Structures are given as C-alpha cells and as structure tokens.
Image (cartoon, rainbow, N blue to C red):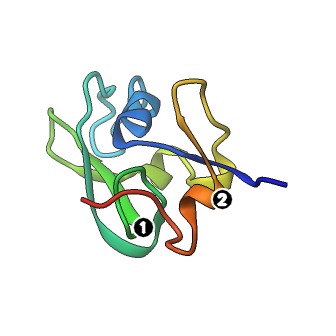
Amino acid sequence: MTLQIWVRSLEDYARQVVGKKCVGCGEPFAQPLIDHYNHDGGWIVYGFSRRQWLSVRCSHCHYDTSLWKLGIRGDVDNLPEKSSLQIDSETLGNRGSVGER
C-alpha cells in the first residue's frame, strides 16, 4: 500500500492568497509574493527540506500577514488542486519532505 502525500508549492499558496484582503488596510492581494523562512510550526512546502512559515506583504501598506491570518491553513487542512505535486511515501523515504532549497 502506498501512502499518497500532496505537497503544495509556494506558487500554489500564492494562488490561494489572490483576492484575500490585507488585515492592515483592507486592500485585496492581486499578485502576491510569498515570503518564507524555516519554522517548525510552518507549512510543508515543495522544494524545501524544512517546514516554512509563510506570509505575504501588502503592496499598498507594506503590512506583513501570515497566511493563517488569511484563513489559509497548511498541510492536511488544504485539499490538493490537480496542479499540486503528488508524491508517494516511498519517494519521500525517511526525509519527511521533498526537495532542497
């Protein structure tokens, strides 16, 4: 039996941010760039060996907002879109995540 694990990319998360509103000024995010850094409580993100804390900076007021404040929860709480990468447990092995950046 193969366990299927869906791993979202930064681009997948950016698509989820589009149209959500900045908590600082209320402007909708149009073309967000996802900021990230290593964080044990963060999201599993394709291309990173460690969990990443994800946030987005408003282009209008420059307020940084974590994705969880926008209602975008990570890992198993996000069902995959067809464009997300599908990886089985044999590919993951004991590494716990995919890729390296």
- Residue lying farthest to the right in this orientation: 1
SS class, disc 2: helix
Q: Is residue 41 left or right of residue 49?
A: right
- The residue where tag 2 is placed is 89
| Side (left or right) of 25 relative to 3 | left
| Foreground label between 2 and 1 | 2
Where in the figure is residue 94, as x and y percent of width and height? 56, 75
On screen, residue 6 above or below 50? above
Q: Quadrant of residue 40?
A: bottom left
Give the residue type at disc 2.
Ser
Tell me which residue sits at (14%, 45%) in the image: 62
Judge the density around disc 2: few (<14), some (14-19), many (≥20) Cα neighbours within 10 Å: some
Residue 28 rendering spot, x and y as whole percentages:
33, 26
From the viewer's side, name the closer residue of 79 and 59. 79
Residue 52 occupies quadrant: bottom left
Total labels: the figure holds: 2
Residue at the disc numbered 1:
51
